[in-house]
Image (spheres, helix red, strand yellow):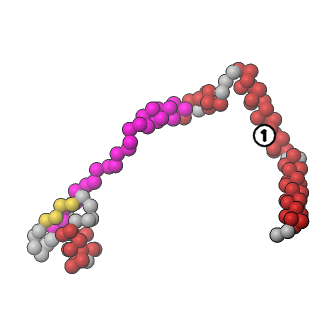
């Protein structure tokens, strides 16, 4: 792209952004938000309060739960212990106890008899 084409593309983009800016300046909702922000910052300065203190006043439960979570955050969460499953082969009476599906004997049964059949052998 030539330098002139780059210049014209940048100029066009700038004009579009300026038009969007003018639209936003005339938006009544935006004007209200700006006015609210200015008043809120003025109140915060007048009473010497920060944003966290304001949130703690407005939502006391939320602020305390976050603080508690951060202090206890050093301990990692532990996974729930896996349940031991017992499968009984009705043909041989053999039992397999496993916490996962990666047991060699269980895999052999599933390959020989089918997964749905072996899953039905699960003792409750």
Tell me if 8 is positioned left or right of 30 in this view: right
Residue 34 percent across, percent down from the top left: 80, 38
Assign the C terminus to one quadrant of the image: bottom left
**Magenta part of the protein: which range?**
63-88
Tell me if 74 is positioned left or right of 61 in this view: left
Identify the residue shown where x is 86% and y is 56%. Answer: 14
Q: Which residue is mark 1?
A: 33
Identify the residue shown where x is 65% and y is 30%. Answer: 51
Residue 49 percent across, percent down from the top left: 67, 24
Along the line of sight, the residue nearer the viewer: 83 or 41: 41
Identify the residue shown where x is 89% and y is 54%. Answer: 19
Tell me if 63 is positioned left or right of 25 in this view: left
- Residue 66 falls inside the magenta stretch: yes
Query: In this view, which residue lies farthest toward the front?
Result: 3
Along the line of sight, the residue nearer the viewer: 25 or 120: 25
Whether residue 43 is visible here, answered yes or no, is yes
Q: Quadrant of residue 120?
A: bottom left
Judge whether 57 appears above or below 24 on screen.
above
- Residue 84 falls inside the magenta stretch: yes
Q: Quadrant of residue 115?
A: bottom left
Whether residue 58 is visible here, answered yes or no, is no
Along the line of sight, the residue nearer the viewer: 94 or 8: 8
Identify the residue shown where x is 62% and y is 27%. Answer: 53
Label 1 crowd (10 A; few <14 / some 14-19 / many >=20): few
**What secondary structure is found at the residue carrying circle 1?**
helix
Tell me if 23 is positioned left or right of 88 in this view: right
Assign the N terminus to one quadrant of the image: bottom right
Residue 11 percent across, percent down from the top left: 89, 59
């Amino acid at each position: 792209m030539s330098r002139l084409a780059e210049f014209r593309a940048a100029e066009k983009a700038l004009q579009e952004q300026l038009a969007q800016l003018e639209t936003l300046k005339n938006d009544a909702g935006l004007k209200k938000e700006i006015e609210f922000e200015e008043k809120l910052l003025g109140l915060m300065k007048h009473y010497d309060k920060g944003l966290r203190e304001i949130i703690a006043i407005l939502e006391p439960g939320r602020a305390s739960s976050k603080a508690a979570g951060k202090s206890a955050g050093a301990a990692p969460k532990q996974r729930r212990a896996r349940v031991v499953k017992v499968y009984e082969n009705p043909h041989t009476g053999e039992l397999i106890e496993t916490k996962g599906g990666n047991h060699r004997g269980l895999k052999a049964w599933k390959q020989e008899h089918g997964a749905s059949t072996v899953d039905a052998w699960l003792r409750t």
